[in-house]
Image (tube, rainbow, N blue to C red):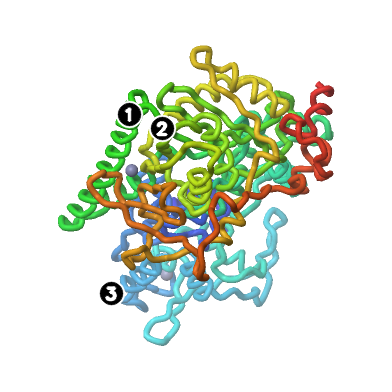
């Protein structure tokens, strides 16, 4: 039996091209964009959407289909009234109607494997009983095939021609299916496209590649953590081309054979969930989600509700901006009225150096809390780095206190604006810092208002201040925190920023105040307090221990009151008599991972508080 005729069979002809090498059925999944827990950066395969899958299916069912090369292949048609002209008189043994059923049943299986298993079951192979000597040009016959069909419980022997013609398959397909059984493989197994390609990346090469990608420090983002916990971010100065070039450099040094850039990219996309750009916090997640919901919804009632909610949200944002505008005007006209906005800039990395070694190092960060004074349009920046302090609400509260003590100590009424970042800005600690300020005799502040902008729609003047800093820093080499300080002071010629370096002693804790008060979850009207809805907070000198708040910025609504007076009886101590303590008693330890990367250890107690910004500075500075 020869299998040369296989070329005539369209089913076999392109099989090696048609099937994907690693067609693993388990990768099929339905898209789930709602909660993105992907572990790799690339989208999962949506096999059911593939054109090729549809082609394959049509082919297995014997239907007409178009090959990947555009060739149209006709559907399998039953060949009626076939005459094999053999001695067995096959057509007499199997009626035409039965033949048709056999044909139909075969193609209705719709699976290449099942069909082949079926074929193998119908063909019996035996050794020849007596070997006829042949001339030397042909080898002796190895085996004889017996073809049969199962008809109503009986097996009917037919000739090969009749067998192939009834099922409309090629000699080649049958031969290959039978040969697999001869080799001990399961009947109907499908090897097409499953061989490892000759140029497959070796395990060693792949490990080297994975290690290289892993050697870059990556970070989790504060903004995407909730809905996409596996996503991590690489430093912003990296991109895939740079990474590949660094990889080539690495291979050259280590005398390794590098993979092609396409392989590097594919591995990066498929095996990692790494991204380059930090997501902007300026887009409003609420607006985004309403937009998606609106597009998906067909229900008129629902659509109207969504539109209404969105409208209200936008009006709120607009009202906040209007309020800021009014307070700016008021600050310029009224003596004793001080308005400012504050915001924490995104962390500023250092070192930023253009040598390849720097890419593998974990960055350290400089923090900058900006206070923008509305009356003068001046920016005041309070700067420290992560070896000095973290960036929690008490750090922020300390900066604001310092700012108000220096800039607003002679004002009666202070208005602060900020984004709602509940962790940092809208919480009890910031309120306690404000309470401390109004109760203090060291300044004249009687009232502090804190108004919250709608996140993503705030357009705080701080944003444009930070824009100046970040634009000026582009393409600059930054070794140490001091370099960021220079950038901040130099980046604006008109109205330059005022820079204040924050030292450890500048950060205070309101721990004792927190212990002195009683946090109540209900207001004075016995209504539950929802901090997430609060739009405005006010503390007043004459009303110690009392937090005034509104869920709107409108002046027309009255304040609600939260009483923080301690539960225990007797006269509560004067707030101004409760001291703040140092937030950090010792030097902030640097995490082990970072220690290995940047400078010498800074865990030794900081004996010299006047050291500018950080301990490692001088040593780093002399190196370069
Ligand atoms: Zn026949
Ligand atoms: Zn919005």
Q: Is label 3 in a helix, a strand or a loop?
A: helix
Read off the residue under disc 1: 330
Read off the residue under disc 3: 97
Q: Which quadrant of the figure has residue 321?
A: top left
- Residue 239 visible in the shown view: no
Give the position of the C terminus as an image quadrant: top right
Q: Is residue 56 left or right of residue 180?
A: left
Residue 314 pos. (x, y %) = 27, 42
Q: Nearer the viewer, residue 483 or 241?
A: 483
Q: CA distance from mark 2 to mark 3?
A: 94 Å
State yes or no: Cβ of the residue under disc 3 lies below 8 Å from any atom of ligand 1: no
State yes or no: Cβ of the residue under disc 2 lies below 8 Å from any atom of ligand 2: no
Relative height, residue 77 to residue 366 (above, below): below
**Quick one: label 1, few (<14), some, or many (20+) residues within 10 Å?**
some
Q: Nearer the viewer, residue 466 or 354?
A: 466
Q: Which mark is residue 427?
A: none
Read off the residue under disc 2: 339
Residue in view at x 46 percent, y 38 percent? 445
Q: Is residue 389 left or right of residue 517?
A: right
Point out the tag, 2 or 3, that comes first from the N-terminus.
3
* Callout 2 touching callout 1 (CB < 8 Å): yes
- Residue 440 visible in the shown view: yes
Q: Nearer the viewer, residue 480 or 343?
A: 343
Point out the tag, 2 or 1, that comes first from the N-terminus.
1
Give the position of the N terminus as an image quadrant: bottom right
Residue 622 pos. (x, y %) = 83, 22
* Callout 1 touching callout 3 (CB < 8 Å): no
Q: CA distance from mark 2 to mark 1?
A: 8 Å
Q: Is label 1 in a helix, a strand or a loop?
A: helix
């Amino acid at each position: 039996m020869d299998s040369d005729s296989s070329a005539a069979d369209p089913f076999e002809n392109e099989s090696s091209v048609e099937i994907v090498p690693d067609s693993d059925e388990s990768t099929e999944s339905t898209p789930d964009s709602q909660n993105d827990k992907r572990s790799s950066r690339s989208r999962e395969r949506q096999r059911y959407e593939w054109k090729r899958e549809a082609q394959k299916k049509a082919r297995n069912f014997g239907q007409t289909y178009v090959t990947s090369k555009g060739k149209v292949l006709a559907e399998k048609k039953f060949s009626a009234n076939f005459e094999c002209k053999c001695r067995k008189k096959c057509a007499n043994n199997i009626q035409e109607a039965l033949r048709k059923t056999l044909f139909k049943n075969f193609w209705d299986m719709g699976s290449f494997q099942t069909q082949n298993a079926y074929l193998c079951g119908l063909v019996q192979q035996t050794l020849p009983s007596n070997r006829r000597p042949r001339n030397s040009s042909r080898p002796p016959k190895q085996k004889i095939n017996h073809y049969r069909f199962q008809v109503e419980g009986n097996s009917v022997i037919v000739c090969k021609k009749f067998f192939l013609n009834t099922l409309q398959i090629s000699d080649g397909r049958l031969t290959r299916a039978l040969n697999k059984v001869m080799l001990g493989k399961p009947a109907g197994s499908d090897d097409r496209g499953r061989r490892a390609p000759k140029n497959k990346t070796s395990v060693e090469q792949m490990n080297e590649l994975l290690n290289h990608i892993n050697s870059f420090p990556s970070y989790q983002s504060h903004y995407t953590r909730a809905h996409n916990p596996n996503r991590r971010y690489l430093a912003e100065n990296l991109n895939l081309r740079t990474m590949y070039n660094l990889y080539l450099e690495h291979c050259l040094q280590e005398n390794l054979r590098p993979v092609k850039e396409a392989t590097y990219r594919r591995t990066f996309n498929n095996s990692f969930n790494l991204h380059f750009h930090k997501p902007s916090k300026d887009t409003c997640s609420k607006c985004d989600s309403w937009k998606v919901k609106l597009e998906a919804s067909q229900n008129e009632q629902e659509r109207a509700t969504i539109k209404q909610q969105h409208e209200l949200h936008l009006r709120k944002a607009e009202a906040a901006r209007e309020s800021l505008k009014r307070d700016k005007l008021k600050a310029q006209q009224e003596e004793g009225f001080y308005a400012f906005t504050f915001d924490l800039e995104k962390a500023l990395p250092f070192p930023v150096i253009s040598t390849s070694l720097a890419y593998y190092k974990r960055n350290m960060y400089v923090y900058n809390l900006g206070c923008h004074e509305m009356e003068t349009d001046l920016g005041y920046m309070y700067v420290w780095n992560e070896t000095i302090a973290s960036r929690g609400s008490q750090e922020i509260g300390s900066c604001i206190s310092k700012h108000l003590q220096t800039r607003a100590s002679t004002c009666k009424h202070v208005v602060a604006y900020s984004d709602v970042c509940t962790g940092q800005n809208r919480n009890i600690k910031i309120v306690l810092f404000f309470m401390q300020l109004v109760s203090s005799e060291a300044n004249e502040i009687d009232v502090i208002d804190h108004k919250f902008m709608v996140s993503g729609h705030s357009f705080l003047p701080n944003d444009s201040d930070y824009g100046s800093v970040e634009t000026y820093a582009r393409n600059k080499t930054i070794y140490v925190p001091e370099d960021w300080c220079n950038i901040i002071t130099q980046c604006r010629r008109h109205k330059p920023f005022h820079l204040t370096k924050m030292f450890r002693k500048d950060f205070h804790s309101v721990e004792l105040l927190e212990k002195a008060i009683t946090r109540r979850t209900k207001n004075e009207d016995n209504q539950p307090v929802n901090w997430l809805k609060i739009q405005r907070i006010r503390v007043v000198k004459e009303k110690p221990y009392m937090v005034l708040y509104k869920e709107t910025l409108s002046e027309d609504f009255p304040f609600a009151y939260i009483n923080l007076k301690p539960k225990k009886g007797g006269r509560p101590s004067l707030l101004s008599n409760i001291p703040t303590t140092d937030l950090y008693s010792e030097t902030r330890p640097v995490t082990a991972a970072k220690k290995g990367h940047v400078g010498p250890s800074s865990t030794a107690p900081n004996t010299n508080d006047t050291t500018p910004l950080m301990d490692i500075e001088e040593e780093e500075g002399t190196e370069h």
